[in-house]
Image: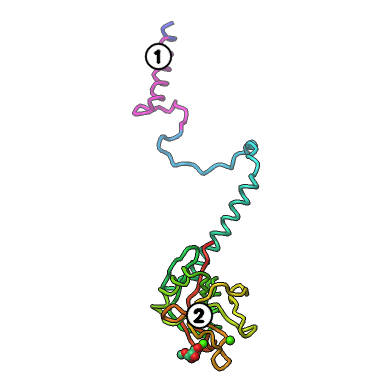
Amino acid sequence: MHSLILISTILIVAIWSCLTEEPTKTNLCIEKPERYGKEGREGPPGPKGDKGETGRPADMHRITELEEEIQTLKLSVSNLGKRMPFTYWSRYGQKMFATKNDTLIFKEGIKLCKEANGEIAMPVSAGENDALWQFVKLTGGAYLGVNDMKIEGQYEDFNTGNPVMFTNWRSGEPNDHQSEEDCSEMKSDGTWNDLWCKWSRAIICQFKLI
Ligand code: MMA
Ligand code: CA
Ligand code: CA
């Protein structure tokens, strides 16, 4: 009986010293991992998880709407880039007039406006003519879209190919001076004159907002 109590006591002390580990660790203790040992290497990847829930069906109508919106934004950004060289801007209604203040022959002016995804200035009302005139006061004589290149005496809008409805010819104009004037300009007083297409004039482009 006494020896049983003794053995039990020894075992309890041994187990207790193993659990507390320090400082009375005996060689009876089962080997345990070090408390501050280095981290082991990463194990192999686990098995594949369960399939997720089925997503909501794609809203094709919304996607189409967004695609259209992206196209519009792309065009705006592209136009902004192309129009950066234009230094002077003026807005009238749904039309913007802009110039880089360079003088070019008619053909080159058309090219310049086209490259910026715009058109050569062509006022279609007294209001637009006035707005453009404010610009021409600064730039000097500027080309207009109106021309009679196709048929002498039949004045068309270069941008649309349609006959012009609104005109503001200076008195005595258009006179087709020396039978070679098929382009036209706005003079510094806001009136129009037909002139030779090879003269250099200020180039004002127009950009429609809608
Ligand atoms: C005159 C007049 C115009 C013509 C220009 C050409 C100065 O104005 O005849 O109609 O277009 O000359 O230089
Ligand atoms: Ca003419
Ligand atoms: Ca003339």
Q: Nearer the viewer, mark 2 or mark 1?
A: 2
Q: Under tag 1, what secondary structure?
A: helix
Q: Nearer the viewer, residue 109 or 93?
A: 93
99 left or right, relative to 63: left
Decide if ligand 3 comes within 8 Å of the CB at mark 2: no
State the quadrant of the C terminus: bottom right
Q: In the image, residue 113 lies at what x, y percent?
A: 53, 75
Q: Amino acid at mark 1?
A: Thr
What span is in magenta?
A: 5-32
For residue 190, above or below residue 37: below
**Could you tell me which residue is drawn at 49 percent across and 68 percent down?**
81
Q: Quadrant of residue 10?
A: top left
Per the rendering, the mark at residue 100 is: none
Image quarter where the N terminus lies is: top left
Q: Which residue is mark 1?
A: 9
Q: Nearer the viewer, residue 93 or 47?
A: 93
- The x, y position of residue 116, in whole percent, is 52, 72
Q: Confirm whether the magenta stretch covers residue 104.
A: no
- In the image, which disc is placed on residue 169? 2
Residue at 61% x, 47% y: name it: 62
In this view of the protein, can residue 179 be seen by the observer? yes
Q: Name the outermost residue toward the left.
A: 23
Residue placed most toward the observer, 169 or 195: 169
Q: Residue furthest top?
A: 1
For residue 85, say whether it is visible: no
Secondary structure under tag 2 reads: loop
Q: Is residue 29 magenta?
A: yes
First-in-chain label (2 vs 1): 1
Q: Amino acid at mark 2?
A: Trp
